[in-house]
Structures are given as structure tokens and as C-alpha cells.
Image (cartoon, helix red, strand yellow):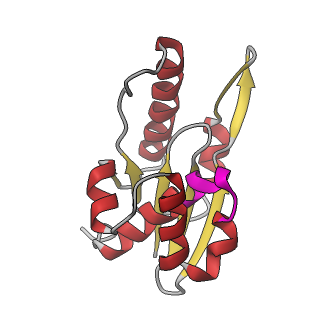
Amino acid sequence: MVIWGIDPGINGALAAFHVEEGQLDIHDMPIMEVRGKKTVSPQLVKNILSEHHGPVCIERVGAMPGQGVSSMFNFGKGYGILLGVVAGLDMPIVEVAPPTWTKSLKVPQGKDGHRARACELLPAYSQMFARKKDDGRADAALLAFYGVTHDLGVG
């Protein structure tokens, strides 16, 4: 069985946790450019998720204070693309609020804290979280780990 974790957004990632093997596969968010704007690629997301059918644990996101209207629209569009692709593949989806999964996994605040906690919980994959810009990978991996530890793959 595989449980997916998705950190939505242009700098996010998709992580597949193979429960029986304890193996983790991480894919940076596939993006494409449309009229000079980066956006999530539905086709490439579908290709990645089609590799392994399984439940998806995705971070529930919403508007963030201080963000511009255009950037929030594009972020919401990407989130909708992810939800649509998962639904189209008939994969179960669980949306988890950031405070819920971070508190449960005892994740320190800040992007560096997220990367550090991913290294602690998944030490064999710490090289995947080594750079500051790997926080999306860390969050996707932590969301998949949350899904595994909270039995989100059953029922």
C-alpha cells in the first residue's frame, strides 16, 4: 500500500510512502508555464499519482494574510488542480489543516524546523531535505508519514 502526502503550491511536492517497504519517493511539484505564469501541471501530476494508487493526505490551505489577490488566485487554482486530479483518479483524499499534522508530529515552527523534523523521522531520506528550498519536500514527506501513522489508508 502507498499513502501519498502532498504539499500544494509551486514549491510543493508529492511524496509516496510505501507502507510495507518503508520506502519514500518524492517528486517536486510538476509545473508548467502558461502566459508567463507558473502553474501546477495537471497532466504531470496525474502521471506521478498514477504510478501508485492510494489515499492522499493533502495540506488544507486557504488565503494567507499579506498575499496579493493574483498570487492567491493562482495558489487556489493549483490547489484545485491537485484536488481534481486526485478525484479523477478515484483516490481517497484527506485534507489536513497545518496545525493538526504539525502538532501531531511535533514539528517545530518555521521551514527549517519542518526540514529538521523530516530528517529526524525519515533519516534515510535526509539528503532530500538538505537545502532551504526543500521545505516542500519535507512537508510532503511529513504529510505522508502523518497519513501512515494515523491510519488514513484504511476505510
Residue extending furthest toward the bottom: 21
Q: Nearer the viewer, residue 35 or 124?
A: 124
In the rendered view of the protein, which quadrant contains the C terminus? bottom left
Q: Nearer the viewer, residue 117 or 49?
A: 117
Residue at 42% of width from left, 61% of height from top?
143
Q: How many discs mark residues in the rendered view?
A: 0
Residue at 53% of width from left, 22% of height from top?
74
**Residue 71 left/right relative to 91:** right
Q: Is residue 66 magenta?
A: no
Q: Position of residue 124 (x, y in %)?
A: 62, 82
Q: Position of residue 108 (x, y in %)?
A: 40, 61
Question: Does residue 54 appear in this view?
Answer: no
Q: Nearer the viewer, residue 59 or 88?
A: 59
Question: Does residue 4 appear in this view?
Answer: yes
Residue at 43% of width from left, 21% of height from top?
66
The stretch in magenta equals: 130-138
Q: Quadrant of residue 135?
A: bottom right
Residue at 54% of width from left, 58% of height from top?
112
Q: Nearer the viewer, residue 85 or 17?
A: 17
Q: Position of residue 119 (x, y in %)?
A: 55, 74
Q: Would you place residue 31 above or below residue 147 in this image?
A: above
Q: Position of residue 68 (x, y in %)?
A: 49, 15
Q: Would you place residue 142 above or below residue 36 in this image?
A: below
**Residue 64 left/right relative to 78:** left
Q: Is the magenta region chiefly helix, strand or loop?
A: helix
Q: Would you place residue 85 above or below residue 62 in this image?
A: below
